[in-house]
Image: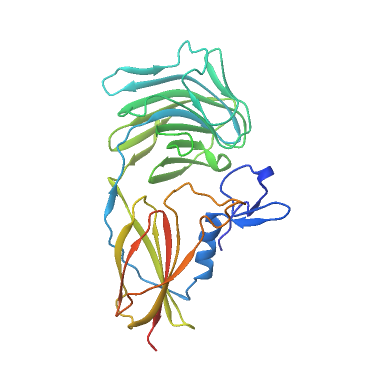
Amino acid sequence: MCSYAPLFVNPGWQSWNPNAIVFDSAHAYGTPSYHVQALFGNNKPDVILPVEMQSMEEPLSPISGSIGLGSYSTQVEYKDIKVTGSKGEILFNSKGMKTLEGWKKNRGAWAVSDGVIKQVSNDTPTCILLGDKAWNNYTLTLKARKDSGAEGFQILFDTKNTESPNMWNIGGWQNTKNSVEWDPVTEYKQCSVEAGRWYDVKIEVSDKAVKCYLDGQLLHDVARPTGRQVLHTVAGYKQDTKEVIVKVVNGTPTPRTGTVTLAGSKSFVSGKAIVLANSDPDAENTFAEPQKVAPKEEKLEKVSDNKVERTFPANSVTVLRLQEKK
């Protein structure tokens, strides 16, 4: 029951990234996202097996970053923007601001008028960033108003760049939900915003948590974990071929070595690995290089008893197909 939208894209009409299949009048290729979908679809077991993953946690980067303003297919206004440090020092105050000098923009029609920052396009998504990436332990306050459009406001915090921001998304999902999207944590709550009304927004960012207030009401109090699990896995059994199929994802920039132990299964006589990986996390396929990021198959040399020891490459999806003894 998996879907991808849009499934196809012509480069001349691309409105977002990623899509699954890119085509022109004469050629087509699958993106890395397409190959992930195909790997799971072509290696589907009949029965899911219980899995226990023991892997070291990777420490998360320190909590620090710029603040920002955003929108998604919505025309918005922001004013009275203030960033206050932990000792009460003013890091930024929009009072008297006449231009967007110092702000970094990814897209959208942003402008300042009478001290109000406006975004009037229908771009998805759009944002502007301000501040030092080393900012931490600060409080961001502002007023936000939706003029028109499908959703609400996006307030960025603890953010290093415009393409993968941490944010409080207020009135997202067609103006039905709030979400704190703070890598690697996401928390949702039901919420909508009214057009034409000014809202008071406050975000408190500390070393261990973020608190989000709307009109003085605390809506989110989200703690951040100290690290993230480096390997993720799922396993199953294919009855007609008598194979155990294990899928392992390493989403980190470092190769990780681990042992797959299949307690209770018979000994294995053969196996193969299908690996989709690239050292560059931003690598893409193109018409010139349609197989730059594509699955590669190899024979498993060390298959015995109930264990497989393997190094999983950085930024990879690995499928192991293990044939049981008859």
Q: Residue furthest right?
A: 25
On screen, residue 239 versus residue 134, left or right, reads right
Residue closer to the observer: 17 or 50: 17
Q: Residue furthest front?
A: 288
Residue 188: give x, y in percent of width and height. 45, 44
On screen, residue 6 versus residue 177, left or right, reads right
Say if residue 89 shows up in the picture. Answer: yes
Residue 223: give x, y in percent of width and height. 31, 42
Residue closer to the observer: 120 or 198: 120
Total marks in image: 0
Q: Residue furthest bottom?
A: 326
Say if residue 321 shows up in the picture. Answer: no
On screen, residue 210 versus residue 146, left or right, reads left
On screen, residue 95 versus residue 35, left or right, reads left
Residue 237: give x, y in percent of width and height. 43, 77
- Position of 308 relative to 142 (above/below): below
Residue closer to the observer: 212 or 129: 129
Quadrant of the snapshot with the C terminus? bottom left
- Position of 137 relative to 93 (above/below): below
Quadrant of the snapshot with the N terminus? bottom right
Identity of the residue drawn at 44% across and 36% down: 167
